[in-house]
Amino acid sequence: MDHAKSIEAFKEASRYIPGGVDSPVRAFGSVGGVPPFIDRGEGAYLYDIDGNRYIDYVQSWGPLIFGHCDPEIEEAVVETARKGLSFGAPTLLETELAREIVELFESIDKVRFVNSGTEAVMSAIRLARGATGRDDIVKFTGCYHGHSDSLLVQAGSGAATFGNPSSPGVPADLTRHTLLATYNDLESVERCFEQSEGIACVIIEPIAGNMGLVPAEEEFLKGLRALCDEHGALLIFDEVMSGFRASLKGAQGLTSVRPDLVTLGKVIGGGMPVGAFGGRREIMAQLSPEGPVYQAGTLSGNPVAMAAGLASLRKLKSDPSIYVTLADRARKLTEGFAAAAHAVELPMVTEVRGSMFGFFFTDEAVKNFEDAKRGDNEIFKAFHREMLERGVYLACSSYETGFISTAHGDELIEETIRAAYESLERIAE
Ligand SMILES: *Cc1c(COP(=O)(O)O)cnc(C)c1O
C-alpha cells in the first residue's frame, strides 16, 4: 500500500496543528506510523487520499451505526441545512429528538442537548453537584468521560482514593474532589464513601469502552445503585458510547439498574457533533432557566445536528432487530480473530455488546483497567499495522472499542477474518 500522500499531508498538518491532529488518538501514537488522511467514506469503507480502501471498524469512534453516507441521514442533513445552519433559537427538531430519547429511556424524563460527550458529562457532573449540594465525585480508573478538568484524574499514591491530575493544566485543588475506584470492585467504591464527607455522584460507563470493551457485572451495578441510595448520591451512567450501540436503550437495555442521570453522545448525532444529558424530572428541574444550575451553549441543539440524530434514531427504532444482526456479526468477527490468534498460539480474549466489540492479547479475563493493561501491546501494534496494510482499519489503540455498522455484511466480516489469519501468521513468524 502506498501512503506517500498521507505522509506528506501529516507533515504539512503538523506545521499548523499540534501533533497534526485535533484529537490525540488520531495521530497513531500508540501504534506508530502515519495516520491515513481520509478523503471520503462509503458504507463500511474509508478511502484515504492515496486512494487506498479500508474496511472501517472505527466508524468515527462509534457514531456511524449505519455506516458512512447513509442516504436517509444525508438527506435529512441537506434538507435542514438548506433552511439555515443555526438560529440560536428554539426549533421543533429539538423537541422531536428529545421526545424520541425520553420515550426510549425509562430513566430520562427530560433531556438537554450540548455539542459533545465531554460537555454532556461536564454538565451532568455540575448538575449532580448542584442538586446534592456536595462537591466530591467517584469515577473508575480506565473509564473515560471526556476531557473536562474534574475527570482528567489518575490514581494518587498508596491507598488514597483521592485523584491527582492526569494532565498539566488541571488544578490539583479540583481533582482532590474526584475519588478513584476500581471497575467491577464494589469494595473500592465503599472505601470512597468511607473517605468522603459528601459524594455528589458516582459516574460510570456501564459498559466500559475506553479501556477496551469491559462490561460491568450486573451485581456490581446493583451494588452501586444501593450504595448511592444509602448515601444520597446520584448514579450517572455515561452512555456516550454505549447509548444506541449496545442496544437501542444502550446499557440500560441489558441491565435492570437505573441511573439518576444519563449522558449521551456519538450515535445520538448520527455523525454530527451532539451530546445530551438527561434524567429524572426533579433533578433536571435544577437546571437553568428552570433552576439555579447554570449551563448554556450558542450552538446547542443545532438544527442540522438534530436532524442527523433524529434520522438515525428513527431508523434504529423502526427496526430494533438491527442489534441482533450487528451482535451476530460482531461475535462472528471476534470468534474469527480469536481462532486466528489461537491458530498461531497467541492468547486472545474477546467481548461483544451489541454492535461493540473488543479483543485483548491475553488469556486472562479482563474485568478492570489493571487486567486490560495485561494485554500485549507489542502484538497489538503489529496486528494493527498488518491489518491496515491488508485494508482493515481498526482503532489505533488496544484500549479502544471496535464498531460494526449495518453496512458491514457477512462477506466483509469474512474478508476481515482472512486478513486476521494472514496478519497473525506473519506476526508469529
Ligand atoms: C467519547 C466519550 C466521551 C467524550 O465524548 P466527546 O464527544 O469525545 O467529547 C465521554 N464519555 C464516553 C463514555 C465516551 O466514549
Image: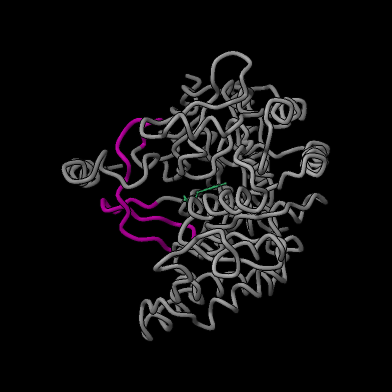
272 left or right of 403 in image = left
Picture coordinates of residue 25 (x, y %)? 40, 39
Name the residue at 47% across, 35% down: 397
Confirm whether residue 324 shows in the render. yes
Camera-side residue of 92 and 70: 92
- Taking the view exactly as shown, the residue that stands out farthest to the bottom is 83
147 left or right of 193 in image = left
- Residue 30 among magenta residues: yes
312 left or right of 354 in image = left
Q: Which range of residues does the magenta coloring cover? A: 28-53
Confirm whether residue 343 shows in the render. no
Camera-side residue of 27 and 325: 27
- Taking the view exactly as shown, the residue that stands out farthest to the top is 158
Question: Majority secondary structure of the magenta segment?
Answer: loop
Picture coordinates of residue 247 (x, y %)? 70, 57
Total numbered circles: 0
Task: Name the quadrant containing residue 230.
Answer: top right
- Residue 320 among magenta residues: no
Picture coordinates of residue 57 (x, y %)? 51, 49
Where the N terminus falls, by quadrant?
top left
Q: How is the image coloured?
A: one colour
Name the residue at 35% across, 30% down: 32
**As displayed, is residue 150 above or below residue 141?**
below
**As displayed, is residue 400 above or below residue 108?**
above
Picture coordinates of residue 146 (x, y %)? 49, 45
Camera-side residue of 276 and 424: 276
**As displayed, is residue 118 above or below residue 248?**
above
**As displayed, is residue 33 above or below residue 52?**
above
